[in-house]
Amino acid sequence: MTDYDTVSADVEHEEEIPEDHPRYQDLLTRHRIETGVEKGITHLQGMHAEGRGSAFDYLLGEETIPSADAAERAAAAHLLLADRPVLSINGNVAALVPGEMVELAAATGADLEVNLFNRTPERIEAIAEHLREHGAATVKGLEADARIPNLDHQRGKVDEDGIYAADVVLVPLEDGDRAEALDEMGKTEIVIDLNPLSRSPRVADVPIVDNIIRAVPNITEHARDLADADEDELRGIIDDFDQERALEEAEVRIRNGF
Amino acid sequence: MTDYDTVSADVEHEEEIPEDHPRYQDLLTRHRIETGVEKGITHLQGMHAEGRGSAFDYLLGEETIPSADAAERAAAAHLLLADRPVLSINGNVAALVPGEMVELAAATGADLEVNLFNRTPERIEAIAEHLREHGAATVKGLEADARIPNLDHQRGKVDEDGIYAADVVLVPLEDGDRAEALDEMGKTEIVIDLNPLSRSPRVADVPIVDNIIRAVPNITEHARDLADADEDELRGIIDDFDQERALEEAEVRIRNGF
């Protein structure tokens, strides 16, 4: 938690962070979240959650490990095969990878839906606007005309023609309760989370233990690579992916990498 | 980073967090830092640093391990033996343990000095006032009439009759550059930090790998216990403490505890 503070907090624009800095990704991530808080996109507690994630990323070696790459390829296959894929966006996701999520949506034909733990009309609108500025044509989550069962009223709000009806949902940086509730609805769930022991990746069909900044562009790359693949090939990729083994490999890496 | 979000962010007062909650300390810590940010005491990046620390604390098992307790007893002995002990306070320390630092200062005859990475007159004054509200009679760091060598101008600012002249300094949650610069000044340095691999605890004479919320009251308890000890006993405690072994034991615990 200390070496963190050795780079000035006074960077105004992310271009000022030197790309060859040994902690470039880390500083970039922190800067984007901080900007998100200032813009009203990210809840203050998102800064805390991001700090927590950054410690796990540090232990992982701040790179996409092979099992995470395999999970990202399986995620791309799921999204391409889906009838109604949806990418769920919260305050941290919007702050960290707005343009990258728009690109992934385009590469897979998925919808973008804003879904917040601390839901206020102002934050919902700020995030939707932020996504539009990054190229999103349509942003769901503003109607909120359906409910995820077994979650309290505010947190269960979703769009009926969005997450409610989706068959495959990407839920990055999601809390355990919502991840479980979506799982119970029978959805194919793809979770991005840096702690392999937390509940969200453990209920996911595809747990991606990786930094979202690396994971999302890599899923997009796999999706583009698989754009012409037939259904059999996509199903083969999905069948080859072993959820338990991916979690185990991440745990071993965190232990030994330290 | 996810299960974190499953407790409402809307707690107004820390008394609302149930003491029997399995993540009580964690929620309390996060709440205090959040309040610190809102009061202008803690920099926004302090929330991130705290999140990072919380991941290491989670891996440690959120308890004071035996080697940390030994470090805390050695820290108490150092502070009691010192001619001019000073406790350094930054924005996170002020938010997390203001009253606990005032008590430790009283139990060891140490001075309190505000020292900030992102120094502004407003934050310095807000923190000094916050410490006074928690019982501090005198708060140093406002004069800033001396400089720590080998640090840039703003960050090196200290009081000449405070940290500059101190023989023993407690620097909790301190960045690596400042910890190294204080070490080079020949001070006996006590560092509290949850990452045993970061630079600050590695340059410290007494590295305490523990959550500051547990560490500070425990140093105070040891100091009270040792109030009547003679110099030989205190020196014996200091000599028995093995800095390298304490760091190793924390590292092993983080690996195996995970």
Image (cartoon, coloured by chain):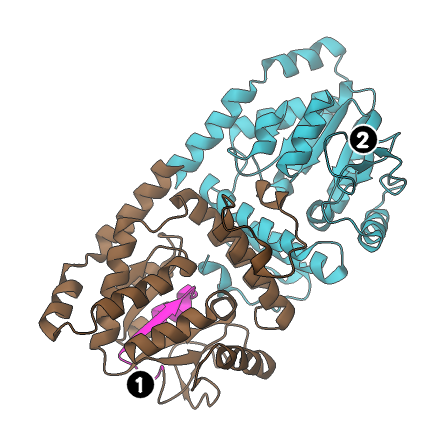
Chain colours: A brown, B cyan
Q: Can residue B208 be seen in this view?
A: no
Q: In this view, does A93 lie above or below B258?
A: below
Callout 2 crowding tier (Cα within 10 Å): few <14, some 14–19, many ≥20: many
**Does the magenta-highlighted stretch encompass residue A167?**
yes
Chain for mark 1?
Answer: A
Q: Can residue A230 be seen in this view?
A: yes
Q: Toward the viewer: A129 or A22?
A: A22
Chain for mark 2?
Answer: B
Write down the residue under mark 2. Answer: B163
Residue that sits furthest to the top in the current view: B232
* Mark seen at residue B143: none
| Callout 1 amino acid | Ala
User: Element under label 1?
Assistant: loop
The image position of residue B244, as x and y in percent, is 52, 21
Q: Look at discs 2 and 1 and give the one toward the viewer.
A: 2
Identify the residue shown where x is 80% and y is 52%. B120
The image position of residue B247, as x and y in percent, is 51, 27
**Taking A204 as reference, is B1 left or right?**
right
Gap in angstroms between the C-alphas marked 2 and 1: 62 Å
Q: Choose top left, top right, bottom left or bottom right for residue A71.
A: bottom left
User: Element under label 2?
Assistant: helix
The image position of residue A188, as x and y in percent, is 26, 72
| Callout 2 amino acid | Ile
**Taking B147 as reference, is B25 left or right?**
left
The answer to whether tags 2 and 1 share a subunit is no
What residue range appears in magenta?
A163-181
**Taking B157 as reference, is A136 left or right?**
left
**Does the magenta-highlighted stretch encompass residue B30?**
no
* Mark seen at residue A165: 1
Identify the residue shown where x is 66% and y is 57%. B44
